[in-house]
């Protein structure tokens, strides 16, 4: 690999580190309480990360940033689900092209919203099954309607989180496109 290739990789790693730390800070420190946790700005930055970095690197940033915020905030039950869900949020996005706000990114926002809603709904059902039935009865309880019905309480908060994140991301992406940020990184 030539010197320019090494420099580009180093720049991406440094940017990824800054973005992962920023995701943690925006998730952990800017909290709006909701009925089942809190709403935060971290997902908007995850979307930006997904539009700026190659998918594997963006997935690591998103997963680690969200997971660290849960660990710091005392939401330890959610560390593994958050790692998985936040990494999956990156999948529908693309860092190709010269702009952040593209047609593909616009289509990725509702898909990412569905990932958030479905991901936390499933996580809630699994966590409720473990806490209600213990290790022995976990599987039987998981396949009963009870945890899935109870987990519905998480859906309104997840919808608000997803819509709010998209609402913050879009003007941020447009503003960053006006200064051609992608050409500078």
Image (cartoon, rainbow, N blue to C red):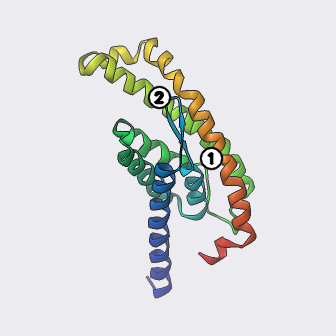
Residue nearest the viewer, comparing 68 with 108 = 68
Q: Verify CB contact (< 8 Å) between mark 2 and mark 1.
A: no
Q: Relative to 156, does residue 183 appear above or below in the rendering?
A: below
Q: Relative to 80, does residue 174 appear above or below in the rendering?
A: below
Q: Nearer the viewer, mark 2 or mark 1?
A: 1
Residue lying at the far bottom in this picture: please name it.
3
Is 39 positioned to the left or the right of 180 in the image?
Answer: left
Q: Which residue is mark 1?
A: 165
x, y (%) of residue 160? Answer: 62, 36
x, y (%) of residue 68? Answer: 39, 51
What SS does tag 2 mark?
helix
Q: Quadrant of residue 162?
A: top right
Q: Relative to 39, does residue 148 appear above or below in the rendering?
A: above
Residue nearest the viewer, comparing 134 with 31 = 31
What SS does tag 1 mark?
helix
Q: Quadrant of the N terminus?
A: bottom left
Is 13 positioned to the left or the right of 166 in the image?
Answer: left
x, y (%) of residue 159? Answer: 62, 34
In this rendering, does residue 4 appear at all? yes
Residue nearest the viewer, comparing 165 with 116 = 165
x, y (%) of residue 120? Answer: 49, 33
Nearer-N-terminus badge (2/1): 2
Q: Which numbered disc covers residue 122?
A: 2
Q: Quadrant of residue 144?
A: top left
In this rendering, does residue 90 appear at all? no
Q: CA distance from mark 2 to mark 1?
A: 20 Å
């Amino acid at each position: 690999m030539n010197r320019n290739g090494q420099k580009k990789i180093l720049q991406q790693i440094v940017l990824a580190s800054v973005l992962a730390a920023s995701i943690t800070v925006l998730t952990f420190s800017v909290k709006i309480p909701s009925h089942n946790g809190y709403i935060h700005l971290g997902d908007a930055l995850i979307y930006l990360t997904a539009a700026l970095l190659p998918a594997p690197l963006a997935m690591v940033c998103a997963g680690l940033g969200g997971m660290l915020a849960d660990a710091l905030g005392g939401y330890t039950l959610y560390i593994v689900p958050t790692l998985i869900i936040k990494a999956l949020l990156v999948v529908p996005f693309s860092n190709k092209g010269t702009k952040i706000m593209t047609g593909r990114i616009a289509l990725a926002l509702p898909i990412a919203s569905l990932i958030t809603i479905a991901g936390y709904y499933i996580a809630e059902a699994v966590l409720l099954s473990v806490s209600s039935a213990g290790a022995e009865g976990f599987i039987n309880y998981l396949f009963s309607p009870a945890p899935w019905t109870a987990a519905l309480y998480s859906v309104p908060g997840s919808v608000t989180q997803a819509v709010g994140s998209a609402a913050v991301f879009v003007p941020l992406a447009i503003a960053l496109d006006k200064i051609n940020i992608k050409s500078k990184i």
